[in-house]
Image: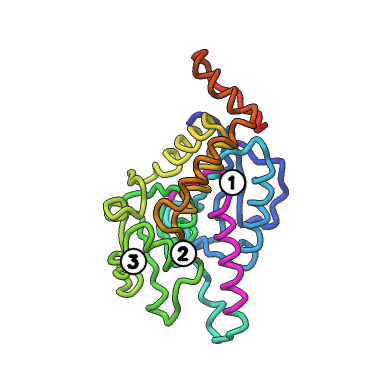
């Protein structure tokens, strides 16, 4: 591990169910809501607050998200919240899930999910909102909502189909099929499958690589890649060229080019 984990002292978290640590330029966020690391009102309010703070921290380039313990990344929503069939409660929770995971999707840096166990329902939707997913081979991933009369409401129907194609999205959502880490890598749901206990270390090493990149260039590239999801092909080619020129207004661009020519690591200033 390139940097030892330390408490992230620049923030007083809104909830103790999201534990924040720092390793170099990476924020590590651990979902700590036993026994299954479910998402509830506390964590769904707390995540956007946390992301706003990290977006404004010039020392944070990447975020790694994982679950406490060895069994669960996150089992998603606590179904007890929906047991009385209250539509008003359902509407509010759907809103909170959407706001939380859309904030994660739109984080300015690179987000990596270290899937260390079950990622079910909203737990998988959380991972789908990240830029990159590393899963352990024994991890189980599913969107099983239809089996209890619900549906994924935090981007699952859209993000899963985008990643794995309509056929596998329908198998997982309409047929309730689970996949382990090995199959998830095969179908493109995760970028890498690793042995049990290795997801966090691999994710942190990958996140450390982000610090070698220009933060502004990463932000623009992410904007362009994700923008292509809802645009006809080639629509953003002109924007891509504009963003390339925009980078030349920044000191970091001159620093990056000269550091390469001088065979030294760049010193990013975010200016």
- The circle on residue 108 is 1
Q: Does 28 lie within the magenta span?
A: no
Q: Can residue 23 be seen in this snapshot? A: no
Q: Which residue occupies the extreme top position in the image?
A: 262
Which-is-in-front pick, marks 3 and 2? 3
Q: Which region is colored magenta?
A: 90-115
Label 1: which secondary element: loop
Instruction: In this rendered view, identify the residue nearer to me: 162 or 9.
Output: 162
Label 3: which secondary element: helix
- 74 up-or-down from 216: above or below: below
Q: Which residue does the numbered mark 2 point to in the structure image?
A: 75
Gap in angstroms between the C-alphas marked 3 and 2? 19 Å
Gap in angstroms between the C-alphas marked 2 and 1? 26 Å
Badge 1, how many Cα within 10 Å: few under 14, some, many 20+?
A: many
Label 2: which secondary element: loop
Asked whether, in this view, residue 196 is left or right of residue 28, the answer is left
Which comes sooner in the sequence, label 3 or label 1? 1
Residue at 37 percent of width and 78 percent of height? 147
Q: Residue 88: horizontal and vertical position, in percent?
A: 62, 83
Badge 2, how many Cα within 10 Å: few under 14, some, many 20+?
A: many
Which-is-in-front pick, marks 2 and 1? 1
Asked whether, in this view, residue 179 is left or right of residue 2, the answer is left
Which comes sooner in the sequence, label 3 or label 2? 2
Asked whether, in this view, residue 9 is left or right of residue 80, the answer is right
Gap in angstroms between the C-alphas marked 3 and 1? 27 Å
Instruction: In this rendered view, identify the residue nearer to me: 155 or 97.
Output: 155
- The circle on residue 117 is none
Q: Are marks 3 and 2 in contact (CB under 8 Å)?
A: no
Q: Residue 106: horizontal and vertical position, in percent?
A: 57, 53
Q: Which residue does the numbered mark 3 point to in the structure image?
A: 169
């Amino acid at each position: 591990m390139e940097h030892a984990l330390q408490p992230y002292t620049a923030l007083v978290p809104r909830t103790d169910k999201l534990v924040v640590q720092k390793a170099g330029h990476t924020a590590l966020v651990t979902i700590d809501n036993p026994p299954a690391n479910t998402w509830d009102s506390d964590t769904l309010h707390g995540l956007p607050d946390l992301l706003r703070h990290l977006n404004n921290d010039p020392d944070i380039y990447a975020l790694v998200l994982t679950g406490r313990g060895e069994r669960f990344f996150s089992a998603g929503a606590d179904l007890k919240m929906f047991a009385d069939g209250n539509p008003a409660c359902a509407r509010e929770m759907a809103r909170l899930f959407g706001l939380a995971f859309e904030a994660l999707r739109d984080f300015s840096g690179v987000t990596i999910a270290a899937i260390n166990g079950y990622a079910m329902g909203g737990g998988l939707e959380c991972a789908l909102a990240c830029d990159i997913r590393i899963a352990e081979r024994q991890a189980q991933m599913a969107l099983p909502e239809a089996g209890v009369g619900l549906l994924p409401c935090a981007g699952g129907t859209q993000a899963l189909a985008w990643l794995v194609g309509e056929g596998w999205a329908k198998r997982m959502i309409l047929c309730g099929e689970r996949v382990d880490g090995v199959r998830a890598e095969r179908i493109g749901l995760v970028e890498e499958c690793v042995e049990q206990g290795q997801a966090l270390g691999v994710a942190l090493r990958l996140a450390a690589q982000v610090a070698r990149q220009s933060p502004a260039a990463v932000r623009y590239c992410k904007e362009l890649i994700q923008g292509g999801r809802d645009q006809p092909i080639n629509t953003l080619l002109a924007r891509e060229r504009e963003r390339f020129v925009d980078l030349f207004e920044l000191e970091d661009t001159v620093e990056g080019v000269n550091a390469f020519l001088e065979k030294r690591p760049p010193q990013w200033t975010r200016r």
